[in-house]
Amino acid sequence: MLSFADEIEHEMEKLEQLKIIKRAEYIQDTVWRESASLSADTRRMIIVGGLFEQYFPEYKHYKPQESEIENQVEFAPVACFLAVLVQDKEYIQQLKAKVDKALRVIDI
């Protein structure tokens, strides 16, 4: 049987754990509500940007700037990469065919 002091200590530990769980739930709920308030276009851009960074990590070092002009200068290499890529229509079609084949293999 636990002493009264041990019981108090045990209950305090449970209370601390509950506080941690509740704080995590609060943070998760807050983040969800904030992201839900973003427009669908903004959420899509965030997702696509994350995917782009995942597969092209060399572009992660570009940081948003204070003005639109500064952003254009900062992100010019990214824009140039995408502009060059999209100009090769035949290559884009080959990539799309590979994607379709891969998606059929994994049954998406």
Image: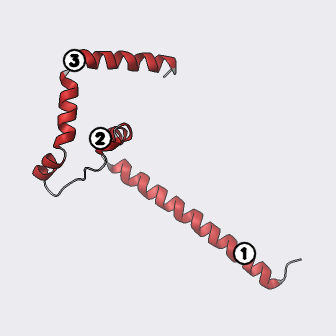
Residue 46 in the image, given as x and y percentages of width and height: 32, 44
Question: Along the polypeptide, which appears first: circle 2 or circle 1?
Answer: 1
Would you call the spot at circle 1 few (<14 residues within 10 Å), some (14-19), or many (20 or more)?
A: few
Helix, strand or loop status at disc 2? helix
Helix, strand or loop status at disc 3? helix
Tag of residue 11: 1
The residue positioned 89% from the left and 77% from the top of the image is 1
Which of the two marks, 1 or 3, is nearer to us in this view?
3
91 with respect to 21 (left or right): left
Between the C-alphas of marks 2 and 1, the distance is: 46 Å
Residue 56, by quadrant, is top left
Residue 79 in the image, given as x and y percentages of width and height: 18, 37
Which residue is denoted by mark 2 in the rendering?
45
Which residue is denoted by mark 3 in the rendering?
89
Residue at the bottom extreme, as displayed: 5
Between the C-alphas of marks 1 and 3, the distance is: 66 Å
The amino acid beneath tag 3 is Lys
Residue 97 in the image, given as x and y percentages of width and height: 36, 15
Up-down relation of residue 42 to residue 92 (above or below): below
Question: Along the polypeptide, which appears first: circle 1 or circle 3?
Answer: 1
Helix, strand or loop status at disc 1? helix
Between the C-alphas of marks 3 and 2, the distance is: 23 Å
The residue positioned 58% from the left and 66% from the top of the image is 20
